[in-house]
Amino acid sequence: MKKQLLSFVLVAGWLAGVAQAQTTTGTASDTAVPVLPKATVNLQQTAQQQPSASAATLPQTQQYLLHSKLTGRTYRIQTMAVGSQPTEGYMPVYVLDGDMMFPTAATAAYTFYHHAKDNGAQPLLIVGIGYDNGKLLDIPMRSLDYTPPMAAKGKISDSQPKRGEADAFLRMLRSELKPQLQQQYRLQADKAAIIGHSYGGVLALYALLQHPQDFSHYIISSPSMWWNEGALQHLPASYFKPLLQAKQDKFVRITVGEYEQAASPYVDANGERAKILADKQMVDKVDAMAKRLQALPNQHLRVESEHYPAETHTGAMFRAVLDGIKYTYRAH
């Protein structure tokens, strides 16, 4: 009987504590919060009370949205200022497919500069240009923004992405993005780099040939030379006229991976994928473009090319970004 009475007193005391805690209006520090027995914890409710996950951010970077009047599209702009701003201003490095490639370019530039005494790295402003849709790679948008305004060769089905608005995209960089960056950073007047891979490589190549006033350094990684039935392989001499007339120094690095044409060890040498790679002839076509650029009679033009051994189309991208960042402050 005494044990039952003692139990009743303890339970009644605990319930009173609960009631007092629920009616107390003091701060969190002076409010007694009862601890419920483990057997009564609602596991589902506890899980719901945990803070929800949020998108990861890269330290020392900034981002904002640019609503372009020239293209009618919204771009996610990410920036990292690497090193103290030089007197003459930062050299901006515009990274296409920024949602996917900006983290690699930014961390590479930061790491190189952190060890500048060993490698001669210089301050840079890394600028990633992506899209406001949560995707790492937006196929329809990059197809539209990164391809030249050329007549379509072959049949284009209705299901294929729209294309051919590279001029509008480059105007956006020149007339909208650059002025916005200049509101926050001092930029060098005569130096700017562009890094593009695949379709982005097509855009960088097009900018070099048709709008050479926009950039001084071009990192052209695995450009899709097969695009539009290989039209870029058969450009008339007149297409190179703007570049031939350029009076400012132009530094061009064009690269491609070995396994963008030959089958890698993971690909059946007699299978469909091997046939596609062989038919695209990426290595041969990139080499042909590099040689054509190197043969142009312009003393202001410097062109170098490289094959990445044992690299696929995706692997070549990372090699090109790392080498491209170094190229921006080594090529003079």
Image: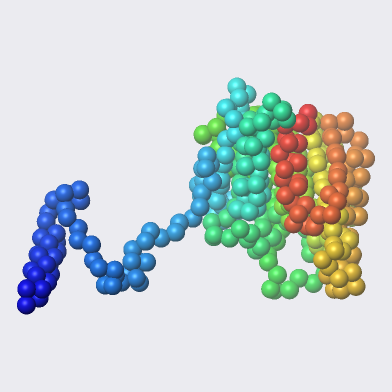
Question: Number of numbered discs present?
Answer: 0
Against 53, residue 120 (above or below) is above
Q: Position of residue 134 (x, y in %)?
A: 54, 59
Q: Position of residue 206 (x, y in %)?
A: 77, 48
Give the residue displayed 90% in from the left and 40% down from the top.
294
Q: Position of residue 14 (x, y in %)?
A: 13, 65
Against 208, residue 272 (above or below) is below
* Lateral position of residue 102 relative to residue 291, left or right: left
Quarter of the picture containing the C terminus is: top right
Residue projecting furthest to the bottom: 1
Give the residue displayed 44% in from the left and 59% down from the top.
53
Along the line of sight, the residue nearer the viewer: 57 or 332? 57
Instruction: Inspect this view and state whether residue 94 appears.
Output: no
Residue projecting furthest to the top: 87
Give the residue displayed 33% in from the left and 63% down from the top.
49
Give the residue displayed 67% in from the left and 28% down from the top.
116
Colour logic: rainbow
Along the line of sight, the residue nearer the viewer: 242 or 204? 204
* Lateral position of residue 296 relative to residue 60, left or right: right
Instruction: Inspect this view and state whether residue 40 appears.
Output: yes
Residue projecting furthest to the front: 2
Q: Quadrant of residue 252?
A: top right
